[in-house]
Amino acid sequence: MVETEPQASSVDPTVGKEAAQRAGAAGGLAPADELALLRAAVEASPEAVLFVHRATLRVAAANPAACQMLGYTPDELQVAELPTIVPDAPGLLIPARGGASGASAQGRETDAVARASLRHRGGAVVPAECRVRAVAAPSGEYLVLVARPAPEGRGARAEEGAARPGASVAAGRAPADSPAAGAERGSPEGRDAVTGLPDRRQFEGRLVVALRKARCRGDYRFAVLFIDLDGFKAVNDAWGHLHGDRVLQAIGARLAGCIRPEDMVARFGGDEFTVLLDHLRGPSDAIRVAERIQSQMATPLEVEGRRSAITASIGIALSWHGYRDPDAMLQDADRAMYRAKAEGKARYFVWAPGGKG
């Protein structure tokens, strides 16, 4: 290594040292010391702390409390995506959606603690209280999520409603005259009184996140399935809404068993369900899930000693058709579902631009 002669300077080299000493005497911290202390505080915090790339929603770093709460190693968390471990992420991110630029570069934070359901690596649901802040860093924008276990008694329905470990089922609206309808609309956790799982708003929020990710990453593909139950109205009319709710619970469990942990199935309202299939390679991946669902639904349900024959008509919309608006994608999936019904029910239809399958 070649060393150069020090250049003459008109600044006394002792000035900086003396300034640092004065700062220390006054109780201030040098930037490096402040950074080290902040890092130590995050590492020692009993609350889970996740640092997430805003553009990709991929976890960049996490503290030991986060690893312990979620059951991951640090290396596993650093390749995870936020919606996989925080199914409620879309709802949590809405307050921080404004970004962290300009005057809010040091952080934009939710005004209150929000309740959410985190997903443990083993599939269990972990009720938690969370705060989210958007922060601008030299390398880009990040989301800082801080979570702690919910106090006893809060979020219990999330655990009761889990159809199976690792599957997220969203619940939407019950029939208007169902006794559960009012409870569904008023659920503070955004969960349905019938199924106890994330609701229509959660699904729509997850779809917003998926569309944003698709715009940022050209290789990311997903699909939306819109499902209508053939024959459910007859069951509801014959046996009443209470029995109908039990049937919906059983159907939700069947649908949840057809998807992967990173996917989401939602009761969109009444006898309609929606599914978001994440990280697909092509249309055949979505078609295989639709066929799996129809195979499961082909077996009659036995609920409370009563046998019900209910099938599913499924519409499929694919993200690589260039959707930017979540409503447009849902509308096309809904249109495809009606095409499937028109062709004889108990089948699927893949929507393509121009309405051709």
Image (cartoon, rainbow, N blue to C red):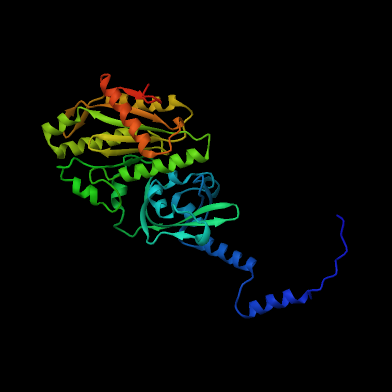
Toward which corner of the image does residue 276 lie, by quadrant?
Answer: top left
Asked whether 260 or 145 is in front, the reply is 145
Asked whether 177 or 43 is in front, the reply is 177
| Residue 82 horizontal/vertical position (percent) | 46, 46
| Residue 261 horizontal/vertical position (percent) | 41, 38
Question: Is the residue 33 above or below the residue 239 in the image?
Answer: below
Give the tally of numbered discs.
0
Toward which corner of the image does residue 166 lie, by quadrant?
Answer: top left
Residue 122 vs residue 154: left or right?
right
Question: Is the residue 4 above or below the residue 270 in the image?
Answer: below
Residue 332 vs residue 187: left or right?
right
Residue in the image at 32% along x and 45% along y:
201
Residue 198 at least partly seen: no
Toward which corner of the image does residue 154 lie, by quadrant?
Answer: bottom left
Residue 253 at least partly seen: yes
Question: In which quadrant will I find the N terminus?
Answer: bottom right
| Residue 138 horizontal/vertical position (percent) | 60, 55
Residue in the image at 64% along x and 77% along y:
24
Residue 346 vs residue 126: left or right?
left
Asked whether 176 or 356 is in front, the reply is 356
Question: In which quadrant will I find the C terminus?
Answer: top left
Residue 316 vs residue 220: left or right?
left
Instruction: Looking at this view, name the residue that lies furthest to the front.
Output: 354
Instruction: Looking at this view, name the residue that lies furthest to the top.
Output: 343
Residue in the image at 16% along x and 37% along y:
243
| Residue 167 horizontal/vertical position (percent) | 37, 39
